[in-house]
Image: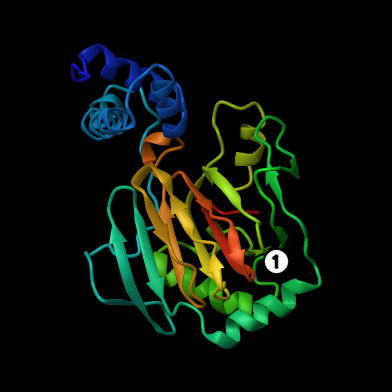
Amino acid sequence: MSLQEVTPELRGWIIEQATAGRTTEEVLAAMLASGWTEEVALAALEHTLTSQVPALAASGNLPPVVPVPEPLPHGTRASVWAGDRQVDVIMNLADPRVVVFGKLLSDDECDEIIALAGTRLARSETVQTATGATEVNEARTSQGMFFDRGEHAVCQRLEARIAALLNWPVENGEGLQVLRYGPGAEYKPHYDYFDPGQPGTPAILKRGGQRVASLVCYLNTPALGGATVFPDVKLDVAPLKGNAVFFSYDRAHPVTRSLHGGAPVVEGEKWVATKWLRQGRFE
């Protein structure tokens, strides 16, 4: 049986799909449906997107790179100062930009945020960039709520810590969103930036510009399941109470490989507090 060959034509097609805004999962599914083996398809995707995307960006075929929060501007270290405490650096990945932090929150802070949020939970919604409104989405089966920025002392303390950790102004952050995932609940892989091709996006961006980074804080440790997953790089981050995972995306495009999701909770429940960072002041 002859081996499948990754031709220049195939690489060109992958680039066309990427510049059109197709997700890596969508391109992979199309390749598998066309008869490519998964091993060859994944290798072709990885090679093409990592070796040729910089040239595409330089030629203007991709959105321009924008500044993003950076928690480790001077390189990897075992821990980093976050304004009021030392935070452990558990994992540091350059592409996609993912950093896992340990002991960002104390147990008491986690418990307090859960208690404050618990009485205000409702079925989680997502922003629909086609209209700019929010609505229930079957891909997201959690319960959630939003705090206003600085609404409680514990929120103010955490927001100041995050600003110091990420070298990004407090006012450029959205209010904390707290989510509760019960058994079987999940959030299927998605991007956090707002799709620039959708008609509702310009209205959304008036409130602080594009999202450029996310920080997911784990408020408890589920008995089983509930990892934060990054399918493009086959990375699973275990949800451990007090820890957090940071990831940034320097353009609103799948080439950032910032596709991520919340794996189903198998046993127990999972509580998280998410902070989204914007380009400018969020009002």
Q: Position of residue 224 (x, y in %)?
A: 54, 68
Q: Which class describes the residues within 10 Å of circle 1: few (<14), some (14-19), or many (20+)?
A: some
Nearest to the observer: residue 135 or residue 162:
135
Q: Is residue 13 above or below residue 72?
A: above
Specify the farthest residue to the bottom: 108
Nearest to the observer: residue 31 or residue 167:
31
Q: Position of residue 209 (x, y in %)?
A: 55, 44
Q: Position of residue 175 (x, y in %)?
A: 64, 62
Circle 1 sits in a helix, a strand or a loop, which is it? loop
* Quarter of the image that includes the N terminus: top left
Q: Residue at x 39, y 64 (%)?
A: 167
Q: Image check: 49 left or right of 257?
A: left
* Residue type marked 1: Phe
**Residue on which the image places disc 1:** 147
Q: Residue at x 66, y 63 (%)?
A: 183
Specify the farthest residue to the front: 1
Image label count? 1
Q: Is residue 202 above or below residue 263?
A: above
Which scheme is used to colour this image of the protein?
Answer: rainbow
Q: Residue at x 68, y 29 (%)?
A: 130
Figure quadrant of residue 82: bottom left
* Quarter of the image that includes the C terminus: bottom right
Q: Residue at x 42, y 45 (%)?
A: 231
Nearest to the observer: residue 118 or residue 263:
263
Q: Position of residue 235 (x, y in %)?
A: 37, 54
Q: Is residue 247 above or below residue 2?
A: below
Q: Is residue 234 above or below residue 16?
A: below
Figure quadrant of residue 246: bottom left
